[in-house]
Image: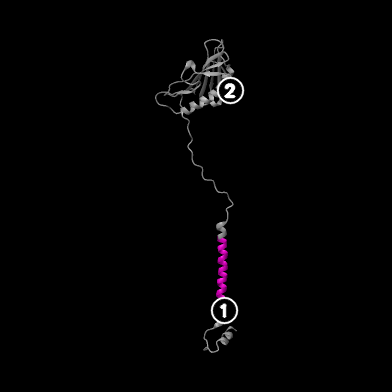
């Protein structure tokens, strides 16, 4: 039919050797192929775009934690920590106690210092002594309080062993061995706490004569305070 219409429009043209119907049919098939291909490409593009913009429902993974090096307390750190803990324990057990330096000394009351063995400073796990002192006054009674802490048994470098003073032994709240002693006249008292890890805390309260201002029970509560552990 297309051939007839074309012939009518070109009546004066020479006979054509071109099969117009075949060309039109071929172009229609090509158009259909392009249409199908275009539809497929569009669908693929939409699918790809959907994948690109799709929101991942999973929460983002947390970045790996940075490896931190555990800090090790120096002897200065331990001395500072013991100072705060000792002062707090004394004020807790004896709220009305007044503290002052012993005999007008330069050091602050109950400020913990440390003593090491030999010329080199050993690590914190080696035996050494942490010490502090203060004059304690409650009402009209005063006495000198001495604090000492460290390891009971020293190594060959220190060549020192801390002996347990005589006294009445009783168990502590965390497996300690607590040795208490009060002189008959009440002028001297000591509490020695031997901890399971081999360290100790020793409190010694004394005055020339008369009753000391703190009881053995108060001294024991201070000595077993876990904040005084090394």
User: Of circles 1 and 2, which is in front?
Assistant: 2
Say if the magenta span includes residue 56. Answer: no
Which tag, 1 or 2, sits closer to the chain's start?
A: 1
Residue found at x 58% / y 23%: 92
Q: Nearer the viewer, residue 1 or 124?
A: 1
Q: Mark 2 points at which residue?
A: 92
Per the picture, the main secondary structure of the magenta-coloured stretch is helix
Find residue 143 and report its horizontal and vertical position in percent. Answer: 53, 14
Q: Which of 191 and 15 is in front in this view?
A: 15
- Tally of numbered tags: 2
Residue found at x 46% / y 27%: 76
Q: Quadrant of residue 46?
A: bottom right
Q: Give the range drawn in magenta.
A: 28-48
Q: Name the residue under label 1.
A: 25
Find residue 229 and report its horizontal and vertical position in percent. Answer: 53, 26
Q: Does 75 sit above or below residue 142?
A: below
Q: Which of 10 and 30 is in front in this view?
A: 10
């Amino acid at each position: 039919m297309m051939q007839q219409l074309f012939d009518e429009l070109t009546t004066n043209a020479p006979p054509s050797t071109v099969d117009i119907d075949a060309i039109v049919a071929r172009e229609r098939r090509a158009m259909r192929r392009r249409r199908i291909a275009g539809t497929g490409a569009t669908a693929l593009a939409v699918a790809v775009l959907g994948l690109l913009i799709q929101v991942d429902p999973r929460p983002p993974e947390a970045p790996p934690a940075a490896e931190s090096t555990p800090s090790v307390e120096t002897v200065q750190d331990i001395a500072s920590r013991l100072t705060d803990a000792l002062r707090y324990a004394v004020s807790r057990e004896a709220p009305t106690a007044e503290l002052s330096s012993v005999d007008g000394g330069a050091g602050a009351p109950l400020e913990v210092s440390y003593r090491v063995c030999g010329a080199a400073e050993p690590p914190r796990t080696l035996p050494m002594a942490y010490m502090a002192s203060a004059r304690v006054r409650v009402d009209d009674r005063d006495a000198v309080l001495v604090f000492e802490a460290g390891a009971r048994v020293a190594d060959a470098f220190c060549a020192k062993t801390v002996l347990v003073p005589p006294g009445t032994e009783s168990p502590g709240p965390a497996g300690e061995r607590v040795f208490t002693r009060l002189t008959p006249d009440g002028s001297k008292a000591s509490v020695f706490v031997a901890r399971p890890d081999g360290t100790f805390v020793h409190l010694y309260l004394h005055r020339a004569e008369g009753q000391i201002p703190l009881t053995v029970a108060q001294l024991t509560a201070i000595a077993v305070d876990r904040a005084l552990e090394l």
